Amino acid sequence: MLKWHILNYWFVCVCVCVCVCVADSLSEALKAITVSTELIEEELKPHLDAVLSALLEKKKGAAVEIARSGILPTLAQALRSRSSLTCQVALVVAEMAREAAVRDPCIEAGLVTALVPHLKSDNQEMLLNTGRAIGRICFDNSAQQDQLVQSGVIPRLVSIMREYPENDPLVNVCLLALCNLADMDSAREALADLSVAEVLTFQLKRAPDAERRHVILEVLGSLGESDTLKLQFAESGVPEALSEMIRGLQGGSDPHDLCSIKIASTLIVSLLLGDESMQKCFGEGSGLVYQDVLSWLQSSNTQLQLSGALAIANFARNDSNCVKMLDLGVVPHILTLLEQHVDEGDVSVQHAGLSALRNLAIPATNKVRMLEDGVTERIKTLLRSDMPPVQFKLLGTLRMMVDGQEEAASVLGKDAVLLARVMEWCEAKDHAGVRGEANRLLAALIRHSHNPEVIHAVTKADGVRHLISMATSEHVIMQNEALVALAIASAIGIEPMQDPFREAELLPTLQKMLEDPAGAVEVKFSALGLICSLANSSVMKEEMDSLNMRDSLNKLTDHGNSKLASQASSVLAMLGDSS
């Protein structure tokens, strides 16, 4: 036991002595460098060795002590002199700059400007040390980063990766530098002329680990926000490289690989936001990226399902693509995906799937085919969703499906379950978007069906008051849709509508619209059309007289819009003839 205590005491003493020696040697080295009047390499080298040794041994406070010693201008001078010590000096600066506290002193001493010219060196070790030093000093310093871009480092970083593509430490330094600079517009402009996509895709394919992949993906993501670079990426095969990477990683459970899949698939969706890049990836339905996106819809990976649905929605931004995708059978895949997520599924996937269906349903020919394929019946299963984003998209998709489709509007307009749910959503107090879409679907069912049974079903479900409320919306398009729907309903059968109209105070509402000096002309036109329909009812006519509607119409005959004034005169004459 005594021997053990003696050994332990000896070990502690040795450690203390070593630390003291390191401290002494660092202090002596700093003092020697400080008092040097000339940069004589033979004299400086042992002192630089001592400084570097203290940094590499992670001596506590060494970097701050070096910065405070006053040797930084000497180091900058050594870098400018391009001596045999330059590489070692760059390494000293790189190791010192690990400490955030010394970065500003390094900048003030002119170390960055002294280092930048060395990025043109043909010595790979010098490039590595210089890149690390600059990267650490300028980390999270936007002013310095902007100066770096202005000094032309961007083309050199790309050139280094082209010249030494197999030097992993050096490539990594360049990638990290691009990652820090890629959010800057000036950096993106500089990269636009450099064909950087080819360099990045090459490195992506040979990335040795997830960390390297993630850095490259982050650079691609930042640069891909530029429309110019989006198109370059598409033309240089970036989306295909990302798809290939995803294929290689699918099926595994490694969290790093799953993270790579998420970043890459999200990046592909982002690149599809550019019209030209999207069209190139689509390739008339035979593009590699489009084919992979279809397989994502059938994947068990929720992230890929989401990205797949979002990508389809992006591809479906023009009619020709929509028609082609329907021919290629994309709709059943989306419907199956939605059905997988009906109960306690992923809200984002549901939202994205419905967005894709809505876009696909825009061309009139697609609506007919999708209705024949039973799309509306299958997506109605989502009516039980309690999630506002899903409700919002479902309502919008159903509204798009019935647009110009009389039969579909008639079928849905008589569906008691659908109407009951729509009525609930018409009163959604916490989500204006859901409330607005529910009202618009209600109006669309009447406008596109012109069906007495639909009007009866809507009236029975207490939908009239929602349409009248919609007519006072702040959005002109919604006001017009409501007024047209009410005009159609009253023209087809006014008698059953009389009581609901009176209870909901429709005529006073119309009178306010006509008299509102700030009201839109098109809304006043629609209001006049509705008054014409209502005038066919003696009950509604009596109410108009009691409200003195003629006075309101009279004022409108002097409106600055001649067509509106003429229409008001016609309605006024019609009311006079029927009295």
Image (cartoon, helix red, strand yellow):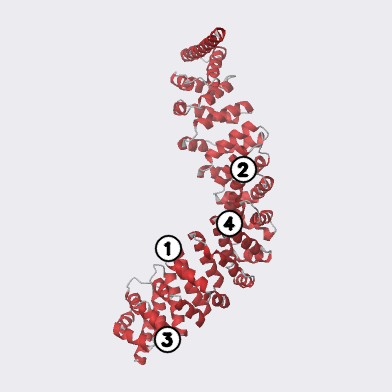
Marks 2/1 in contact by CB < 8 Å: the verdict is: no
* For discs 2 and 3, the disc positioned in front in the rendered view: 3
Q: Which residue is mark 4?
A: 310
Give the Cα distance between marks 3 and 1: 32 Å
* For discs 4 and 3, the disc positioned in front in the rendered view: 3
Looking at numbered disc 2 in the image, what kind of residue is underneath it?
Answer: Val
Label count reads 4
Q: Which residue is mark 1?
A: 432
Residue sitting nearer the eye, 329 or 67: 329
Residue 454 visible? The answer is yes
Q: Which residue is mark 3?
A: 495
Give the Cα distance between marks 4 and 3: 47 Å
Q: Earlier in the sequence, mark 2 or mark 1?
A: 2
Mark 2 neighbour class, 10 Å CA radius: few under 14, some 14 to 19, many 20 or more: many
Give the Cα distance between marks 2 and 3: 71 Å
Q: Position of residue 406 (x, y in %)?
A: 56, 78
Q: Earlier in the sequence, mark 1 or mark 4?
A: 4
Could you say whether the residue bearing mark 3 is in a helix, strand or loop? helix
* For discs 3 and 1, the disc positioned in front in the rendered view: 3
Q: Position of residue 575 (x, y in %)?
A: 36, 88
Q: Position of residue 85 (x, y in %)?
A: 58, 19
